Amino acid sequence: MRLSTLLSSSLLIGTLSAQQSVTVSTSPSNATQTWYSFQNGVVESRPLAEWDLAFEITGITGSILANTAKGIAVYKAPYALTQWASIDTAGLAASWPMQHNSETNWSSGAFNQGLTSNPFDLGWGIYNMITHNIAGDSAFVVKLANGDFKKFRVDGYSSATDNFTFTWADLDGSNQQSNTLNRTTFAGRNFGYVSLENNTVFDREPATNTWDLLFTRYMAFVPFPVPSMYPVAGVLQNRDIEVQRVNGVTPAFSDWSAGTFSPAINGIGFDWKNFNQQTFQWEYATDRVHFAKDRDGNIWKLVFTAYGGSATGEMTFTQELISATSVQELDAATTFTLYPNPVVDGRAQVLVDMPATAADLLVFDGSGRMVMTQRINGLGGMVLHTLDVSALSAGLYTIRLVGEGVQASSRLVVQ
């Protein structure tokens, strides 16, 4: 939604101030994964245990996830593919590295770890920059959730057919099976899914452009009581959603303009909650706010407030749209200057020269609360506007100028 569609600054404030409480369920024992849209709510829920592997559909990183939250374990075997018939688990417990999906990047799955210095090494195979094929070169041992061990390899990826082919068998070579995952079949998704137990390839994920957050159980590094990878329940974001985490503020804090957004998929993560071993109650980060930037550039404020534990798997948070414009940062053709700064007589001069014909001037206090807004009309050239701040208490304020296609922020000290 472009700023020009907002009829007045009062409409802007009314639109951006609406706050709602949302509860998303991952079911008892976090048995389901739930995809959520800021605009449309829950998009889809599916059983977490129905899949074992997930193959990335776009790009050349060849990410392959393992459902480690289900109990699957992936080990890179110290065997060449030519030794496929000889693979066993001797030495596994002592020296084989257990591999995990990245907590921060969808494009680095459990099968993509332990990379060499070769820039085309994807962990399970080598990318050919001429043919765009990937030749499998690594053997793995996979422990399924039911405790069975399988040897596993990705035979390769063919750009001509857009197929991944992969093979697995019992350690003694019996029950060998192969399958193919065609990426075209899953166009518009992040991943295509595989059940090794059922030897099926299937679609279970909503279209990438329909969801923003995934509520799920996953493996994360937990430093206490012993540093280790541990199953947690939390929130991961879609690959095109960025999050800014702000600590040490009140839930009323709304000034996202000075911070940095990160594409790391665990920007929200799991640690907004903590289980108190003395009281046996869940506790929540009361001084934390998350800002999420969706694929259209809208900014949403999220404050997580409750978790039902394994009994319900419910996660509760407040959601508020605080910026409904997809705008770019200030460019060289735009001037935005405040003076004098500090302000001593209650009036600041705002010098504006920007391509937009009108803009909103938004004033936030130190807690991030919007305390004033003014509409500046008649732009399209250099304009001098007087901002009356005499009603504001002494302190530091953030001034945001938002116009069609551009935005800028500055600090103002009121004395």
Image (cartoon, rainbow, N blue to C red):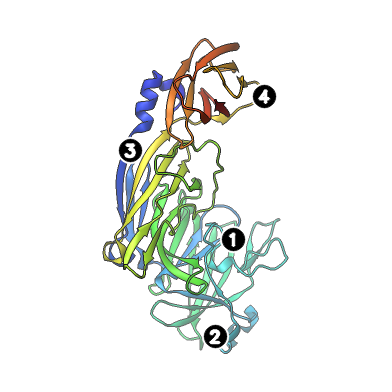
Does residue 330 appear anywhere in the picture? yes
Q: Which label sits in the foreground, 2 or 4?
A: 4
Q: At numbered mark 3, what does the secondary structure look like: helix, strand or loop?
A: strand
Which residue matches tag 1?
A: 158
Q: Which label sits in the foreground, 3 or 4?
A: 3
Q: Is residue 122 left or right of residue 234?
A: right
> Reading the chain from its start, which is encountered first: label 1 or label 2?
2
> Reading the chain from its start, which is encountered first: label 3 or label 1?
3
Which residue matches tag 4?
A: 332
Q: At numbered mark 4, what does the secondary structure look like: helix, strand or loop?
A: loop
> Reading the chain from its start, which is encountered first: label 3 or label 4?
3
Q: Position of residue 180 (x, y in %)?
A: 49, 66
Residue found 33% across the figure and 42% down from its top: 40
> Reading the chain from its start, which is encountered first: label 1 or label 4?
1
Disc 3 and disc 1: Cα gap in Å? Answer: 48 Å
Q: Position of residue 269 (x, y in %)?
A: 45, 56
- The type of residue carrying mark 3 is Gln
- The type of residue carrying mark 4 is Ala
Contact (Cβ within 8 Å) of mark 1 with mark 2: no
Q: Position of residue 164 (x, y in %)?
A: 54, 63
Eyeballing the image, is 192 above or below 172? above
Eyeballing the image, is 264 above or below 148? above
> Reading the chain from its start, which is encountered first: label 2 or label 4?
2
Contact (Cβ within 8 Å) of mark 2 with mark 4: no
Disc 1 and disc 4: Cα gap in Å? Answer: 46 Å
Which residue matches tag 3?
A: 19
Which residue matches tag 2?
A: 93
Mark 1 crowdedness (10 Å alpha carbons): few <14, some 14-19, many ≥20: some
Eyeballing the image, is 358 above or below 109? above
Q: Position of residue 404 (x, y in %)?
A: 51, 22
